[in-house]
Amino acid sequence: MNRYQDIFNAQKANQFNVGNTTYKARIEKLKALKQAIAVDYKQRIREALYADFKKPFLETDLTEIYPVISEIKYVSSELKGWMARQKVDTPLQLLGSSSWIKYEPKGVCLIISPWNFPLNLTLGPLVSAIAAGNTVIIKPSELTPHTTQVMSELISELFPENEIALVKGEVDVSTELLKLPFNHIFFTGSPHVGKIVMQAAAKHLTSVTLELGGKSPAIITPSANLKTAAQRVAWGKFVNNGQTCIAPDYIYIEAGLKAEFIAEFKIAVQSFYDKAENSESYARIVNDKHFNRLKNYINQAQEDDATIELGGHTTDLDNFIEPTVISNLAEDSVLFQEEIFGPILPVKTYTDIHEVITYVNANEKPLALYIYGKDKKETQFIINNTRAGSTCINTNVLQYSNHYLPFGGSNNSGIGKAHGYFGFQEFSNMRSVLKQHTKGSIEFLFPPYTNFKQKLVD
Ligand code: NAD
């Protein structure tokens, strides 16, 4: 038996001890997690992310630590209500019965996380899993080893292995783990690997949450405030060096606005980073493979005579890619085919909003679709005629930080939802319970099936 099977078996044996805990006990665990992230390990977390891809401390505070703390606070304040038996109505034909929903833990769960927000996207789902009373095996990404090491120490300090265990490793480890009959798998990563996870889960009919990616457009319409739009898109695009699943992947702008928007965009980028290469506010690309992939996008665009409107400079030494905007790209440019996942923003123009609708719907449903404009009718038209995991109007990325909203994609960009109540539901089974109190409700339908009973039913 391998090590993973041992951990799995130990967690399976322990699942009812964990699952039958009160809301108070679960909140205590979340409190300990909060203390570790917000205080005891805080500086080490910052340093680990800096070592992994030069993520600025403040960005780590804002996009890794704060979201998990905020999720813990919210979940803790609501958990009692979520765990309470939820009474539902009983129809007349079941008179004499009462019915309710019990949220029971799924059981032994697996969380597989990506590297781009390595703490947030590992411990965020863990908060939901703990709240719902599960045991968990966690497999973080191999591309951010410093953060994985800190999380590994933090988890083993707070939890016994038969409750929560973190295992390190690459694809081979994931592959071994995916052979086990988990009760639920929460996967965050690419659509390609999402399909592998779902196939493996199908063997055991394991339920899945798949938080995936894709190409999220930012649509800039004529009624938009271009200065504000430019600033917000620039921030949403370059935070985490563009390595954000819900970053605006490309701009789709009304043709007549393009020049002014790009001018405003340049001003915004300049005000954020001055010289990005020397800026302590600008992260780096996580590894050589992704750096070369992105560098090739820029080289290819140059070869195709596209216009580099901003940036384009790269430095191999520390995987630096300048904030880059490219326009006049061919329709079939790779920048319009693959999820970019880096600080390169291609710009596409339209003359009629129906072109945008047709284009978006001809491609996979995006994880996010952003609309900039004050015209409510037009905004509603775009929302009603497209499909996406989420939408922001006049901003981007912020939908992630509202724990009252479900977070996730649709089909190619994801299955299932995370955050707050939705995350709790994802890690729970809604068990239906019906209790019959009194005699004489359905007994009259028991066999023998006489003509008299048939008439009653007719
Ligand atoms: P990835 O799919 O390559 O890897 C994610 C995890 O899966 C890692 O832990 C990795 O070790 C594991 N893995 C890789 N190949 C595997 C295989 N063949 N079998 C089993 N496990 C395997 O993704 P990534 O590069 O780490 O992250 C980037 C992707 O994640 C992007 O597509 C991005 O949009 C998406 N993403 C989505 C969200 C979201 O919340 N929807 C958040 C962040 C990232």
Image: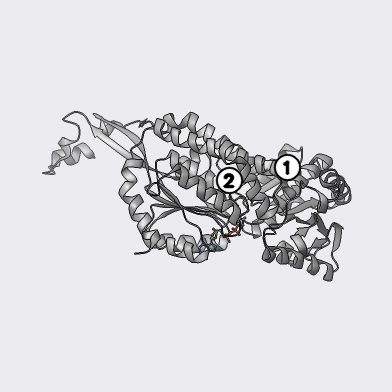
State the image coordinates of residue 375 (x, y, percent, origin top left).
76, 38
**Residue 243 visible (yes or no):** no
Residue 309 in the image: above or below residue 303: above
State the image coordinates of residue 76 (x, y, percent, origin top left).
48, 32
State the image coordinates of residue 315 (x, y, percent, origin top left).
80, 62
242 sits left or right of 111 in the view? right
Q: Which of the two labelled residues, at mark 1 and mark 2, occupies the earlier sequence position?
A: 2
Residue 131 in the image: above or below residue 217: above
The residue tagged 2 is 120
Mark nearest the camera among 1 and 2 is 2
Instruction: Name which quarter of the figure residue 40 lies in.
Output: top right
The residue tagged 1 is 378
303 sits left or right of 187 in the view? right
Instruction: Name which quarter of the figure residue 329 lies in.
Output: bottom right
In the foreground, 106 or 450: 106
Question: Mark 2, residues whose alpha carbon is within 10 Å: few (<14), some, or many (≥20)?
Answer: many
Name the disc covering residue 271, or none.
Answer: none
In the foreground, 377 or 127: 127
Q: Tell me the SS state at disc 2.
A: helix
Say what amino acid the circle numbered 1 marks: Glu
State the image coordinates of residue 1 (x, y, percent, origin top left).
34, 64
Task: Please name the residue shown 88% across and 48% down the image.
Answer: 263
Tell me the distance, in whole angstroms, between the alpha carbons under discs 1 and 2. Answer: 35 Å
Say what amino acid the circle numbered 2 marks: Asn
Task: Please name the residue shown 15% across and 36% down the image.
Answer: 443
246 sits left or right of 304 in the view? left
In the foreground, 266 or 167: 167
Task: Please name the residue shown 38% across and 57% down the image.
Answer: 205
Question: Mark 1, residues whose alpha carbon is within 10 Å: few (<14), some, or many (≥20)?
Answer: some
Q: Tell me the SS state at disc 1.
A: helix
Residue 444 in the image: above or below residue 189: above
- Some atom of ligand 1 lies within 8 Å of the CB belonging to the residue at label 2: no
